[in-house]
Image (cartoon, rainbow, N blue to C red):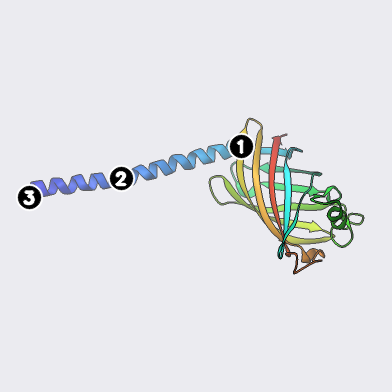
Amino acid sequence: MRSSSLQTRVRAGLAAFLLAAPLAGFSATAQAAADALSDAAGSYRIDKSSSIRFAVDQVGGGGIKGSFPDYKGSFRIDGSNVGKSKVTITLYPESVHANEARVENFLRSDAVFDVAEYPEITFRSTAVTRTGSSTARIDGVLTARGKSRPATFQATVGKQKGGAISFHVTGSIYRSPYGMGVGTPIYSNLVQFDMTLHGTRN
């Protein structure tokens, strides 16, 4: 009877250890992630070494791929409350770069960006929600051609060193609500953004 009781206590102790070990590891990982976020807290300007690329798929074709070399922006990371973090970025569509000059000229025309009338495209965040130890969802308002619509992007923390940090940011925007639906449905209504944003602490 004593042997049975001893075996029961040993099993219970072993089970408790096996349960506690992963939880302890999780706690340490969570603490490390929180510390890393605290270390990154501060205000940053978006460097010119960043990359802002976009793509529009085409039925039976290669679609349109391009980038915006001219932009400016900033973001602030709140280490104690990620929800209070902010992101602002301005793109200058006059600078649009694509695979052909005729495509660039068409994108600058009043059929698409209408750069003569609307020289800027802006995004301002309204909410930042942490989705993982190094990921976040950024909700905000995108304004183009004088029209403002909700937009959502996904961000993943990249390299972090000293006063610099980088993010990989992706998201898709429907272009027709901004008056840029020309070419649909041959060309997709979705514009896919793929950005690498490098920030330097102010």
User: Residue 173 in the image: x percent, y percent?
Assistant: 71, 60
Q: Few, some or many C-alpha atoms within 10 Å of disc 2 (few <14, some 14-19, many ≥20)? A: few
The residue closer to the viewer here, 145 or 113, is 113
Q: Can you tell which of label 3 and label 2 is closer to the viewer?
A: 2
Q: Residue visible at 72% across and 43% down?
A: 51
* Tags 2 and 1 touching, CB below 8 Å: no
Q: Amino acid at mark 3?
A: Met
Quarter occupied by residue 18: top left
Residue assigned mark 1: 159
Q: CA distance from mark 3 to mark 2?
A: 26 Å
Q: Amino acid at mark 2?
A: Leu
Q: Few, some or many C-alpha atoms within 10 Å of disc 3 (few <14, some 14-19, many ≥20)? A: few
- Give me the disc on residue 18: 2
The residue closer to the viewer here, 184 or 117, is 184
Residue assigned mark 3: 1
User: Residue 107 in the image: x percent, y percent?
Assistant: 84, 56
- Give me the disc on residue 178: none
